[in-house]
Image (cartoon, rainbow, N blue to C red):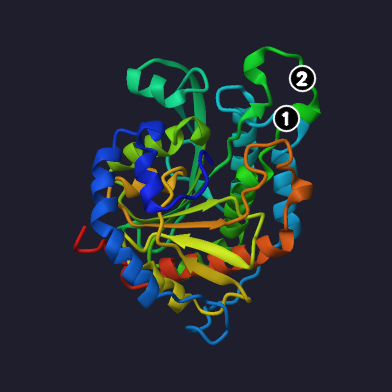
Amino acid sequence: MQFPLMPVEDAIENEKRVKISDMDTFRNLLNSCRTFVAAAALAAICMVASAGCGREARPSMECDPTAMYATIKTLCADSLGGRRAGSGNDLRAARLLADELHAAGCEPLWREALVPFCIPAGRRGMDKVLAGEWCDSSYNVVMTIRSRHPEAEKVLLGAHYDHLGLFKADKGKRHKAADMLRGANDNASGTAAVVEIARCLQPYADSFRRDLVVALFGAEEMGLVGSRHLERMLRDSAVVVGHMVNLEMLGRMRGDTLLLQGEMLSPVSLVAAETGAADSLRIDLSTGFSIGSDHFSFASKMIPVSFFATTDISTLHTVDDTPESLDMAGMERAVNYIMRYLYKLLTLDELPELRENI
């Protein structure tokens, strides 16, 4: 993840830092929706902290925290060097993840699961993107679980798998494993959750009313490059995404709070209420909107999104972001809730529509 979660005002102030071409359009959306979102969050707060809120989702599904932790450990291993985009380690990680998704019952959306795209050089990635200076490649992993309704608009479940590589890499020093930015929470946790959710949901595909597209994005840390590429590719291929669910930093819960953003675009609070019990979690329908993760590539094109994250970002972009620092019990509760929420999206007669006042 590039930036911590931020309120609307800070998102607008950080426009120059983000340097995404769609920001002017989205800034107008943020300004027009600020008052509405605050009111909606109060009216439909749906802090699903008790088992009595909403109906219990069916069927009952439970994730395997041991399997998720194994995926996180693999992604954080010395051999993958921090998964920096363009390093070659990102390609190795992408291949491993494609194998895991295949074992989970997914198939490539297109001919190949690994979809390459160009990336810029240097840490100031978006400057290079906007200047058209391309020099290397990274990869998205794009697969699907097909339903019996291929004509329906899709739900996309995604997370970025890349991270920052070696600490002090720009200073040309010799590095040890201890210098590695492993990115366990950011975002091996979200990546492992996507793989596990796909594995758990695949047996229920016959009950889906729409296909699930599963995407693991490269080069998020360079400015959402992979997700922006995939959004354009889906659009050019006439693959219609009706809702995008993004998972980011799910491994460090604070105060039993799971953040859910997206109310400003569509009534995700209604989906949350329909999802049912949240295993003592507090589902926070935030009035802010993060522009620093991959859902923004879709939200800026007026595609409804649900952005899930836990709220302890104290290890963000530090050498302390290791598998051992994660709260796997909290992550298990978060993923179980997200899985039921996603199942609800996949089985609704109609997806939540874009708000009319946008």
Q: Vertically, is 333 above or below 46?
A: above
Residue at the (76%, 49%) spot, across then down: 325
Quarter of the view holding residue 162: top right
Q: Residue 335 vs residue 286: left or right?
A: right
Q: Is residue 256 left or right of residue 309?
A: right
| Residue at the disc numbered 1 | 180
Mark 1 and mark 2: span between their CA atoms?
Answer: 8 Å
| Residue 185, horizontal then vertical, whole percent | 65, 47
Nearest to N terminus: mark 1 or mark 2: 2
Q: Is label 1 in contact with label 2 (beta carbons under 8 Å)?
A: yes
- Compared to 160, does 312 lie above or below? below
Q: Which residue is mark 2?
A: 175
Q: Nearer the viewer, residue 92 or 45?
A: 45
Q: Residue at x 56, y 72 (%)?
A: 282
Position of the C terminus, as image quadrant, is bottom left
Viewer can see residue 95: yes
Disc 2 residue type (three-letter): His
Seen from the viewer's position, the closer of residues 113 and 135 is 135
Question: Considering the numbered disc 2 on the image, is that residue within a helix, a strand or a loop?
Answer: loop
Neighbour class for label 2 at 10 Å: few (<14), some, many (≥20)? few
Amino acid type assigned to the residue bearing label 1 in the image: Met
Q: Is residue 114 visible?
A: no
Q: Position of residue 286 (x, y in %)?
A: 44, 62
